[in-house]
Amino acid sequence: MHLPEPIPPSVHDETFAGVTYHIRGELVPELQIEVGEASVMFEHHVLLWKETQLEIELKKLPGAIKRKIAGLEFFVTRTRGSGRIAFSRDSPGQCVPLHLRQGEGLDVREHQFIAATDNLDYSFERIKGVQNMLLGGSGFFMDKFRATNGDALVWLHGHGNVFLVQLGDGEQLDVEAGSWLFKDPTVKLEAVTMGLKTGLFGGGGKLTWNRFTGPGRLAIQTLFIAPLEGVEQTAGAAATGGVAGAIVGGLLRG
């Protein structure tokens, strides 16, 4: 198996899928996009600045109630018109651009999507296994992007540095449950728990990994910041106040 290699955090000035973009800075990078005919969708809290003539509007995602209970956004924001717009996330890391050709897809760890061209199918999937729920942070959901309407672009934020490994057919790699960023849909993901013996009073513990099986690409991030607060509060609201409580609570928190 080829060892994971770092994705260079170099400055990008590229055009793809009808969009020109620039990545500036290294510690907390800025993604700057020149918006024209192709609209861009994004999470509202990552917006850094925009030119005044460029308008934005809400876009409702499918499965809104299920997404909100899971602690996921059920609205994203998208551009309307033309102009420059810029995004960043509130943590050190890398902005990783991913080019998708027509028919290609991408599975992404939740809460690490920055922006994407608006011609993508954007859905989510629950990762099975209680280990991912309890020990892997909020990583029991993943975003799924599919280029079903022409070529498309997805930009992700990787915490820390991002490494990429190409898994061959049947090759496997165990990754700490919070440390993967994205994978190709052809890569299988499962939770694996290993018992640990401490030798003290016959006690032990458990260690949970995510096991990935190729073929396909797998990206690993060196710093993981678990977005647990929103998930825990939303789950509590759903338990005590029902679905409506979860949705209203999420809106009141912004």
Image (cartoon, helix red, strand yellow):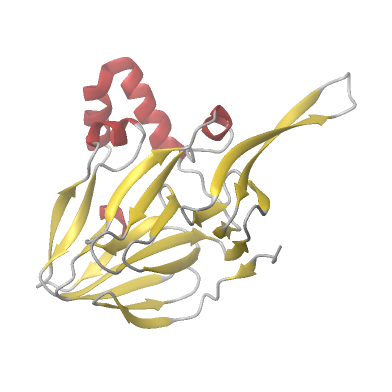
In terms of depth relative to the viewer, which is nearer, 136 or 159?
Answer: 136
Q: Which residue is drawn at 30% across and 62% down?
A: 116
Residue furthest toward the front? 169
In x, y percent, where is residue 196? 80, 31
Quarter of the view holding residue 190? top right
Please name whichever residue, 94 or 25, is drawn nearer the observer in this view of the structure.
Answer: 94
Residue drawn at 39 percent across, 57 percent down: 105
Q: Quadrant of the N terminus?
A: bottom right
| Residue at the outermost top position | 240
Q: Where is residue 209 in the image (x, y as percent from the top left)?
A: 65, 41
From the viewer's perspective, is residue 144 above or below residue 235? below
Question: Can residue 147 be spotted in the picture?
Answer: yes
Q: Which residue lies furthest to the bottom in this view?
A: 13
**Residue at position x 50%, y 70% from top?**
27
Identify which residue is drawn at 12% across, 70% down. Answer: 54
Q: Is residue 1 above or below residue 195?
A: below
- Which residue occupies the foreground of this view, 148 or 137? 148
* Of 194 and 246, the residue lying toward us: 194
